[in-house]
Image: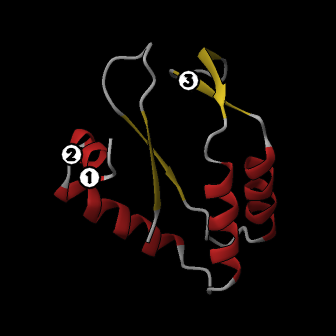
Amino acid sequence: MPLLVMAHIPHLDGHYEFWFNFHGREGPFVKEALSLLGTQPLLILNVHDRGPEPVRTFAFPNKMGRFFMGVRKALTESAPWEDRDFEEAKAALQRRHSPEGLFRLLGG
């Protein structure tokens, strides 16, 4: 199952989906990234349009550190999935729910 993070950023209108394939073939890199996300005091989100430079940058307190560490622990206890499986699960969720519907489903 893919991991979906829905973020409400007051300065942006609408809901935006952030999909992460934390359990793909990248393995050690992903576990290291989750450890880092679990300990960072701030999360920084760069919003890109079509070029390499961000058009907006947001920094906010990391209230999800424990979540990221929990995901890391869960991933070490299960086998990785194929990228194709991730994309299929993501597409199935997107067919069933709008971004707003996913946000409500996740308690937003």
Lower position in the chain sequence, tag 1 or tag 3: 3
Question: Helix, strand, or loop for circle 2?
Answer: helix
Q: Are marks 2 and 3 in contact (CB under 8 Å)?
A: no
Q: CA distance from mark 1 to mark 3?
A: 26 Å
Q: CA distance from mark 2 to mark 1?
A: 6 Å
Q: Position of residue 12 (x, y in %)?
A: 41, 17
Number of the front mark, 2 or 3: 2
- Characterize the local packing of mark 3: few (<14), some (14-19) or many (20 or more) Cα atoms within 10 angstroms: few
- What amino acid type should be assigned to the residue bearing mark 2? Gly
Camera-side residue of 72 and 57: 72
Q: Are marks 2 and 1 in contact (CB under 8 Å)?
A: yes
Q: Position of residue 36 (x, y in %)?
A: 80, 50
Indicate left or right for 21 with 17 as reference: right
Tell me where residue 42 sits by quadrant: top right
Tell me where residue 32 sits by quadrant: bottom right
Indicate left or right for 52 with 49 as reference: right
Q: Position of residue 71 (x, y in %)?
A: 62, 66
